[in-house]
Amino acid sequence: MAGRDHQVSLYDLESARLNRRYPQETVIQGVAAIDPRGRWVAGGAAEERVVGLYDLATGQSIRRFTNSAEANCLAWRPDGQLLAVGGLDGMLEIWNAQTSERIARLEGHESTLVAVGFNHAGTLLASSGWDNSWRLWDARDWRQSLMLPGLSYQAQFSPDDRTLAYIGHTGRIHCLEFAPADCFRRMPPNRPVSNSARNLDVSQDRRLALASSLEGFTMWDLSSGRELISVPSSPTSSALFTPDGRSIITFGRDGVMRWPLNRTVLTGSEEIRIGSGRLIGEGDRWYGAISPDGKWGCGTYGFATNRVEIFRLDDPTQRIPLGRHTGANRVAFSPDGRWLASGTWQGRGVKVWDLEARKLEREFSELHIATVEFSPEGRWLATGSHPVQLREVGSWGVQWSFDSLDSNSPWIPVAFSPKSDLLAVIVRDRDIALLEVATGRVLANFESPDRPTLVCLRFTPDGTKLVTLQND
C-alpha cells in the first residue's frame, strides 16, 4: 500500500505485519497491481499519464508506460506478460510488460474506466466505466465481443471462468455465465497483417490450417485455435500441404518452393518446425495445385506466359506442357489425376485438360473470371463465377446454376465437403451459403459475428468443420 506521503510498503496479509518498506524513489499513487508471478508491481507513477513497473522484492524501477490519460485501474493477464491499463479518458490500453510495447488500444468506453480484469485463461478481458457499460473483449485479437449496461468496480471471473459477476444498470448484482461454443471460432494471427490473404489448406489429419498471403504463410492448430508458426517470405499465392504431410509447397513471386515440415508430438502439445525453403520451380507463379498422389504440381503463370503445364515435384525438370489459357490463375486436379481444370483472373473461360492425352478436353468460354474445384469423389466440377455452376465430369453438362451471390468479387470461392454432398459458396463477399450438391438447394446460411471479407474456404477432411480465410 501507499500512504499519503506516497511511501510504498508491503504487508503480509495473514499476519498483517510489515514485510518491507520501499525506497523513497519508489513512487506508486492512485492504483497498483502485483503481477501473478510475484515478480513485479505496477502502479501510477509521479509523472502524469505514466504507469511504472517496479521489482517487487527491491522496489527498483524497471520500465515505464506512457498512456493516453492517467491510469484509474490495472489488471495483469494471468501469465504476467500483459498489463491492461484503464484510463480516465475511457481508453483501455494493453502493454507488453517484457518489451514496453503497446499491444492494443481498445476504444468504446465514453468515460472513465473503473474496473478491468482478465479471465484465468487469459482469453477474455472485462472492463467497466462511468459510461454505465461494461464490455467483454477477445484477448486474442482485442475485438469487442459483448456490451451490457451496468457499472461495476470489480471485474471478477469465477475460478473455472464460466461466470462473471457484475452490477447491472438497476444496481442489482448479476452473474453472466459463459459456455464454450463449438459452432464458431475465430483464430487471429499473433501480429497485425495487411489485407493480403490469398489461399487456405487443411492437413489430412485435420489438425493444422495453412494460410498464404503477400507476407508469407502462417499455420494454426485447429483444435486450440492457436497460431503455431509464421514464415515471412515473398508474396505467396498458395501454400499447400503435400499429401504425405512431410512438406509444404508454396507458389508465389519467387517461384515454387518446397519447405520441409517436421512435426513432433509432445505431452499434450505438438512441436512444429519448418526447414528452409528450396526452389523447385522458377518463375513468378500465381495459384497452384498438387495432384492427389503428390507427384505432380501445377502453378499458373497468369499473363506472364499464358501457358498451362504440370511438373514432377520430385524432379521439376520433367514438365508436360498442356497449352495456353490467357490469364490462367486457379487450377485444380481431379481426384483420379485424369483431369486438370484452369480458371482465370481478368482472362476468360474455364478449360479442362486431359492429362493422359495431354490435350485440351473442353472449354467453357461463356464463363468469365472463375475459380475451379473438383468434388472429392470425382463426379462434379464446380466453377466459381457469376453464376456458380455444377458440371458433370465427362459429359461436362451443367447440372445446376446458383446466382444468388450479391457479390462484388468477380470470382466466387467454393469448396466441396469430403462426401461430395455439400458445396460451400461465399456469398455477399462475407457470408457462406451451404448448397446441396444433388439439387443446388440452399440448406443453410452462415454469418460470422463481425462479417469480414472472406477470400477462401475449406472443409476439414472429416467434414466436421468449415475453415475460412478472411482478408483483414
Image (spheres, rainbow, N blue to C red):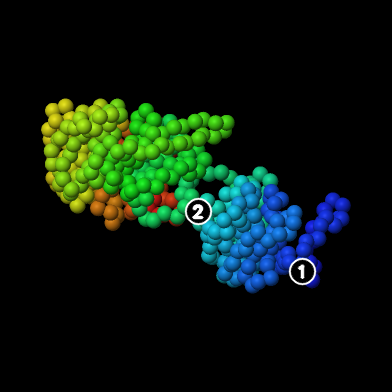
> Crowding near pointer 2: few (<14 within 10 Å), some, many (20+)?
some
Left or right for 259, reference 146: left
Q: Position of residue 384 (x, y in %)?
A: 25, 45
**Which residue corresponds to the image point at 75% horizontal and 54% vertical from the top-left?**
57
**Which residue corresponds to the image point at 43% horizontal and 42% vertical from the top-left?**
219
Asked whether residue 70 appears in the rendered view, the answer is: yes
> Crowding near pointer 1: few (<14 within 10 Å), some, many (20+)?
some
Q: Which labelled disc corresponds to residue 444?
A: none
Q: Position of residue 224 (x, y in %)?
A: 52, 40
Left or right for 220, reference 94: left
Against 303, is 380 above or below?
A: above
Between discs 2 and 1, the one toward the N terminus: 1
**Which residue corresponds to the image point at 52% horizontal and 51% vertical from the top-left?**
140
Left or right for 286, reference 112: left
Asked whether residue 401 appears in the rendered view, the answer is: no
Residue under numbered circle 2: 141
Q: What element carries label 2?
A: loop
Name the kind of residue labelled 2 in the image. Asp
**Which residue corresponds to the image point at 28% horizontal and 54% vertical from the top-left?**
409
Q: Where is residue 220 in the image (x, y as percent from the top left)?
A: 45, 41
Residue under numbered circle 1: 6
Name the kind of residue labelled 1 in the image. His
Q: What element carries label 1?
A: loop
Q: What's the distance in space between the residues labelled 2 and 1, CA to CA?
A: 37 Å
Against 126, is 373 above or below?
A: above
For the C terminus, the quadrant is bottom left
Q: Which of 15 and 161 is in front in this view?
A: 15
Q: Position of residue 422 (x, y in %)?
A: 34, 37
Q: How many discs appear?
A: 2
Whether label 2 touches label 1, CB < 8 Å = no
